[in-house]
Image (cartoon, rainbow, N blue to C red):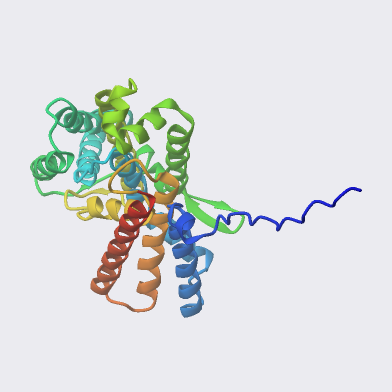
Amino acid sequence: MSTAAPATAPQSVPSRFTASNILREPLLGPVVALILAIIVFSALSDSFLNPQNVSLILQQSVVVGILAVGQTLIILTSGIDLSIGAVAVFGTIVMAQSAGANGPVVALGSTLLVCVAFGAINGGLVTVLRLPPFIVTLGTFTAIQAATRLLAGSETYRVEEGPLTFLGTSFKIGTFATTYGVVAMLLVYIVMWYALSQTSWGKHIYAVGGNPQASDLSGIKSGRVLFSVYIVTGVIAAIAAWAALGRIPNADPNAYQNANLETITAVVIGGTSLFGGRGGVVGTLVGTLIVGVLRNGLTQAGVDSLYQNIATGILVIVAVAVDQFARRRSQ
């Protein structure tokens, strides 16, 4: 006589949506925050989701959004770059002055070389002399800012319409109007997303930022990877300088004074860890949009810019606190 096998209770499948797993998803929080911000400001203002206003938010985010890609690379290696905005502003002055004497092609090439040179200086000081990135870029920020004013002579240089202002040219997709600067920003994000997620160079960046000792033992040339990151950041600063002249065709030595801090804000809000090795450019794009939506929505609501800065600062503190908590839980 056969005996029936005892019935076993179905085993529960672990849920992916536990608090622990959610905290390990650095992109989830920023996406939820962006959606909530859009919902709130849409309820407060009928014109918030107007195509013209959406286009304005994107255009206002272009320069800081591009610079934030370079900042992401640096922070992924557990560093920080306080000079990237100053490098871009210096690039706009070089571009405007070179264009008047040598034409737009030489101007673009000169700006690229200068910005890459600054990146090489930062990278060399960090990798060869092993100085802390915070101190290095704080020093170069001060020097570059002074050099910009000396080079410009406290003057603003008007750039004629043409190749140097091309990224400010508008075009339409149906009824939605935007600029080529927005397209350039998205292309920079796509290229760097591919580089970080699909190439060995990108994997080495995460390895160096997550555990530099282990990456050295595994055969990764950490110094070479770090230096290449600063070089790429210089290239990105040159693109941002070009986009800045497209946005406003004036090379002003006093422009984008807070760009360095705004890029860090976008990166941190986007879920990239200040301790390195965790995050990515997709989160940075979301973080950039959060800041843009927040500022635009509060402006439409009639909130003073000082209170907007307070709100942004609180958001950064919350993002860092969440990152700290997530790291402790994962450990």
**Residue 225 horizontal/vertical position (percent):** 30, 27
In the image shown, does 301 or 223 lie closer to the viewer?
Answer: 223
Q: Quadrant of residue 69?
A: top left
**Residue 275 horizontal/vertical position (percent):** 28, 46
Is residue 107 visible in the rendered image? The answer is no
Q: Residue at x 70, y 56 (%)?
A: 10
Residue found farthest to the right: 1
When the figure is inspected, residue 15 is found, relative to residue 114, above or below; the finding is below
**Left/right of residue 280 with respect to residue 259 in the rendered view:** right
**Residue 32 horizontal/vertical position (percent):** 48, 63
Q: Quadrant of residue 94?
A: top left
Residue found farthest to the top: 219
Q: Residue at x 48, y 54 (%)?
A: 21
**Left/right of residue 328 with respect to residue 195 in the rendered view:** left
Residue found farthest to the front: 1
The number of numbered badges drawn on the structure is: 0
**Residue 203 horizontal/vertical position (percent):** 41, 31
Q: Residue at x 25, y 52 (%)?
A: 259
Q: Quadrant of residue 209?
A: top left
Q: Residue at x 33, y 20 (%)?
A: 219
Is residue 153 visible in the rendered image? The answer is yes
**Left/right of residue 176 with respect to residue 267 in the rendered view:** right
